[in-house]
């Protein structure tokens, strides 16, 4: 049975992608040597001399001393379904991909799957880590290179490119606060160099930087426990490492980035920076020897590329920095616009009615939620694909009311008979109460704005020594 018909039969959402050379897209490889093994791993150049993954790692994992990649037929699922494969080695970080590609037999095509469906496929085919055969061996190849990391260091950034939204809050800031409670070393920064990619007005950018710092403090970011700094204050370190990284990054990878594709459509001038942006982001992370990066779902691809770049660097020059992991919220990783449930809520959106801003007044919140798009079905149900707007509102309510650990049907049952109007009223209430203390604290801070300078100065002092050390080591490693 072919991959595609197997998937069709099981009703998985998938596409077959035809491309002359889809080798680079392929994540599924069959290994010869020992038991027939399917390798599902986030590795760009597997099987080529450029590969980052050392075959010796696989050999020790498989208990075999003669592992080679099967040449010719690099088949994906059909071999699994035919029972030809006895075990699957799975790098969990493959699920960070938005799409996973598995080559189909003998043709230049690949099956494109979403991560959730790959999980289902593996489970349906009977692979699990408990059973003896077929066997699933979970393995974190990212951390194979970073055994020297013993504790977590958290880093994340935000662009000062507009008023902060509920998307920033639910996708990132809430998680930043959780990490601060959990870990000792937390670094957060204003990604102002990144903001330049859309050529903001200079005076506006200056204001935004201050406003963003104040909003973050107003959100309750504990700056005794966390470091907050401005990227451009340490811009030399960030951009120099980014340059080194850019020499290691295949150009084609940058063109695959969804955010580049989307943003470049909106820009009159598509600056090179818009394309190389994820490389700077990788440098932001690696410079601080960071291991954990709390971000919203829209940054997933960038994090994946960052991991690849760091792995490539470590592989070529010797271990220098840990391969970081993304920490993406499970309940609501991508908050959507109130006016279009297929678009993310974004601070750069021209339609301000689609966004709830953290500093919106109760009246503004109420007006926007009242006008939020819904559909004609009076029964409220979570259904991302068919009812994105209702799903977005329900998810916001779920998280903001502190019920994120409850199953979706409990929330659906709660709104049974209340209709969109009832949902909107309750959502407004919980939004107003969540954002009230943030707005009040912000207004207080606005009267004493020197605090911003103090915070940023302290931030640089604490962040610079680490950036300096990593850059020096990276330069030494590459021969400079
Ligand atoms: P930025 O400024 O667009 O957003 C800041 C954080 O908010 C999250 N976010 C969302 N989460 C869920 N739903 C939404 N609608 C939504 N909108 C924004 C983002 O995922 C992000 O976590 N490239 C980054 C900044 C950056 C960075 C870094 C982050 C630069 N270097 C290094 C982490 C590590 C950005 O533009 O975020």
Image: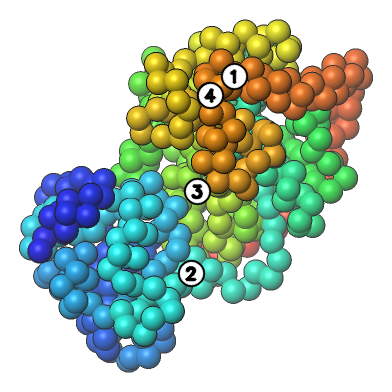
Image depth: mark 2 or mark 3 in front: 2
Pick the residue in front: 285 or 133: 133
Q: Which residue is mark 4?
A: 417
Instruction: Give whichever of discs 2 and 4 has the lower sequence position.
Output: 2
Residue 440, x across and y down, in percent: 84, 19
Count every numbered label the image shows and give the total.
4
- Asked where in the image residue 364 lies, by quadrant, the reply is top right
Tell which circle, 3 or 4, labels the residue nearer the N-terminal end.
3
Mark 4: is the Cβ under 8 angstroms from ligand 1? no
At horizontal 26% and vertical 50% (from top left) the residue drawn is 12
Q: Give the label on residue 140, or none.
A: 2
Q: Which of pointers 1 and 4 lies earlier in the amino acid sequence?
A: 4
**Label 2 – label 1 distance at C-alpha:** 45 Å
Q: Nearer the viewer, mark 3 or mark 4?
A: 4
Mark 4: secondary structure: loop
Q: Residue shown at 76%/56% (left/top)?
A: 182
Q: Is mark 3 within 8 Å of ligand 1?
A: yes
| Closer to us: 194 or 217 | 217
Spatial CA span between label 3 and label 4: 42 Å
Binning the other alpha carbons within 10 Å of mark 2 as few (below 14), some (14 to 19) or many (20 upward) gives some
Foreground: disc 2 or disc 1: 1
Foreground: disc 3 or disc 1:
1
Which tag, 2 or 3, sits closer to the chain's start? 2
Q: Is mark 2 within 8 Å of ligand 1?
A: no
The answer to whether the residue labelled 3 contacts the one labelled 1, judged by CB atoms less than 8 Å apart, is: no
Residue 314 x/y as whole percent: 50, 66
């Amino acid at each position: 049975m072919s991959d595609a018909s197997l998937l069709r039969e099981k009703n998985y959402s998938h596409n077959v992608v035809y491309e002359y050379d889809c080798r680079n897209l392929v994540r599924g490889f069959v290994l010869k040597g020992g038991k027939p093994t399917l390798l599902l791993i986030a590795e760009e150049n597997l099987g080529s001399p450029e590969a980052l993954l050392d075959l010796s790692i696989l050999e020790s994992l498989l208990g075999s001393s003669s592992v080679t990649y099967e040449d010719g037929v690099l088949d994906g699922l059909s071999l699994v379904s035919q029972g030809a494969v006895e075990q699957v080695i799975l790098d969990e970080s493959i699920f960070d991909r938005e799409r996973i590609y598995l080559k189909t037999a003998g043709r230049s095509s690949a099956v494109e799957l979403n991560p959730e469906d790959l999980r289902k496929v593996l489970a349906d085919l009977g692979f699990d880590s408990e059973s003896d055969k077929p066997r699933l061996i979970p393995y974190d190849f990212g951390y194979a290179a970073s055994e020297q990391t013993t504790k977590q260091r958290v880093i994340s950034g935000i662009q000062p490119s507009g008023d902060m939204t509920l998307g920033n809050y639910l996708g990132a800031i809430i998680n930043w606060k959780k990490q601060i409670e959990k870990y000792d070393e937390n670094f957060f920064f204003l990604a102002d160099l990144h903001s330049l990619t859309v050529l903001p007005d200079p005076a506006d950018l200056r204001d935004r930087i201050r406003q963003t710092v104040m909003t973050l403090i107003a959100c309750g970011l504990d700056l005794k426990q966390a470091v907050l700094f401005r990227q451009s204050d340490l811009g030399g370190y960030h951009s120099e490492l980014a340059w080194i990284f850019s020499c290691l990054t295949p150009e084609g990878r940058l063109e695959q980035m969804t955010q580049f594709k989307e943003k470049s459509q909106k820009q009159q001038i598509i600056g090179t920076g818009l394309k190389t942006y994820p490389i700077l982001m990788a440098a932001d992370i690696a410079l601080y020897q960071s291991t954990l990066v709390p971000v919203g779902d829209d940054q997933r691809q960038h994090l994946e590329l960052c991991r690849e770049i760091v792995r490539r660097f470590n592989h070529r020059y010797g271990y220098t920095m840990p391969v970081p992991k993304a920490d993406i919220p499970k309940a609501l990783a991508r908050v959507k616009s109130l006016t279009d449930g297929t678009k993310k809520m974004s601070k750069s959106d021209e339609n301000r009615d689609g966004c709830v801003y953290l500093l919106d007044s109760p009246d503004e919140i109420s007006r926007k939620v009242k006008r939020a798009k819904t559909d004609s079905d009076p029964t409220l149900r979570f259904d991302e694909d068919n009812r994105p707007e209702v799903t977005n509102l329900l998810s916001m309510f779920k998280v903001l009311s502190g019920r994120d650990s409850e199953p979706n049907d409990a929330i659906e049952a709660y709104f049974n008979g209340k209709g969109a109007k009832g949902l909107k009223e309750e959502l407004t209430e919980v939004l107003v109460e969540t954002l009230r203390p943030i707005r009040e604290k912000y207004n207080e801070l606005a009267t004493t704005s020197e605090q911003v300078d103090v915070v940023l100065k302290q931030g640089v002092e604490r962040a610079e020594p680490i950036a300096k050390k990593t850059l020096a080591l990276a330069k030494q490693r590459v021969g400079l």
